[in-house]
Amino acid sequence: MDYTQLPALNAVLNTASAIFAVTGHRYMHKGRIAAHRTCMIAAVCSSGLFLISYLYYHAHAGVIRFQGTGLTRQIYFAILTSHTILAVVVLPLVLITLYQGLRGKFDKHRPVARWTYPLWLYVSVTGVLIYFMVYHWFAPGG
């Protein structure tokens, strides 16, 4: 695969992660713990593949400049800034939540998961939004 195709793959992986996380969250509320575990592991795997692909892409493509102007540019950078900060915050939270859940330490898992889930969902969804803003809606010549 040509590395220029990786942003689209990254958006798919972020979307998959969000879908798995939402589905896993719903399973947990229905008491379907095995299905919850499976979905959350799938969400972690798709997020992990995203991170590898994202880092590989940017190692080869470098910095990609946003082409929007005016208010659109301000909105983009507000989304990008919050996305980036929360992506750094959520990574260790995901790992801690996963570890505690897999070890059966549910008394520690639940309180962290309550923070991890919405942050992770925000990061996944805004990642896809950023993709569309940079590569489709405000792309050069677009």
Image (tube, rainbow, N blue to C red):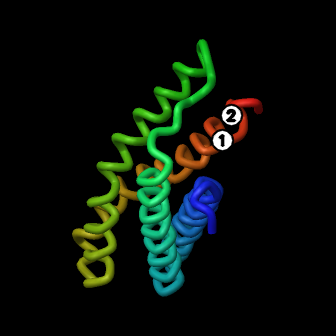
**Given contact means CB atoms under 8 Å apart, are the residues at marks 1 and 2 in contact?**
yes
Across and down, in percent, residue 63 comes to 46, 39
Q: Residue 89, labelled with which disc?
A: none
Measured in 3D between alpha carbons, the distance from the residue under mark 1 to the one under mark 2, in whole angstroms, is 5 Å
Q: Residue at x 49, y 70 (%)?
A: 43
The quadrant of the picture occupied by the C terminus is top right
Q: Residue at x 45, y 77 (%)?
A: 41
Q: Is residue 96 left or right of residue 79?
A: left
Q: Is residue 86 left or right of residue 16?
A: left
Looking at this view, is 104 or 30 the one in front?
104
Task: From this view, report whether residue 80 is shown above or below residue 12.
Answer: above
Looking at this view, is 140 or 110 the one in front?
140
Across and down, in percent, residue 59 comes to 41, 53
Q: Secondary structure at mark 1?
A: helix
Amino acid marked by disc 1: Tyr
Q: Residue 139, labelled with which disc?
A: 2
Q: Residue furthest right?
A: 142
Q: How many marks?
A: 2
Residue 13 location, quadrant = bottom right
Q: Secondary structure at mark 2?
A: loop
Residue 75 location, quadrant = top right
Q: Residue furthest bottom?
A: 34
Amino acid marked by disc 2: Ala
Q: Residue furthest top?
A: 70
Q: Residue at x 60, y 65 (%)?
A: 16
Q: Residue 135, labelled with which disc?
A: 1
